[in-house]
Image (cartoon, rainbow, N blue to C red):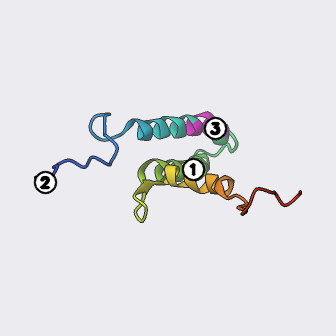
Amino acid sequence: MRKVTVPIDMSSEQKTILGIFSKRQLIYLVVGGAIIYSYIPFVFNLIPNFFVSIFLCIFSALPVAVLTGVLGFLKKSKYNLNYDHYLLIKMGYKNQIGVWRKGPFTKNQ
């Protein structure tokens, strides 16, 4: 049987938006941008000084931007998974652990 090497990485997600972003990454960018856009005007109007307001806006937008970047663009290289998928698997792990018993009867009977 012949073996043929495929020149394209078939396991990674397709970058369909301008060849740079995937649909999943675009959704993360839009949702993160919408969250920042929704609360930045309120943060900007808290302090009347312009430069302090700008600094406060940047400081308050950093956690959302970092979380969006990590979930959308970084990979857990050990498992070859994106962090959002990896965290979903980790959160569901507790539900997969069960009480295993041997025999037809449960402990309560």
Q: SS at mark 3?
A: helix
Residue 24: name its quadrant: top left
Residue 59 drawn at (x, y percent): 58, 53
Residue reaching furthest to the front: 104
Residue at numbered disc 3? 39
Q: CA distance from mark 3 to mark 1?
A: 27 Å
Residue 94: name its quadrant: bottom right
Q: Is residue 38 magenta?
A: yes
Task: From this view, report whether residue 79 is shown above or below residue 5.
Answer: below
Amino acid type at mark 3: Tyr
Give the magenta part as a residue range: 35-42
Q: Are marks 2 and 3 in contact (CB under 8 Å)?
A: no
Residue at x-position 62% and y-position 56%: 93
Between tags 1 and 2, which lies in front? 2
Amino acid type at mark 2: Lys
Residue 66 drawn at (x, y percent): 51, 53
Task: From this view, report whether residue 87 is shown above or below residue 19.
Answer: below
Indicate which disc, 3 or 1, sits on the residue closer to the N terminus.
3
Q: Main secondary structure of the magenta part?
A: helix
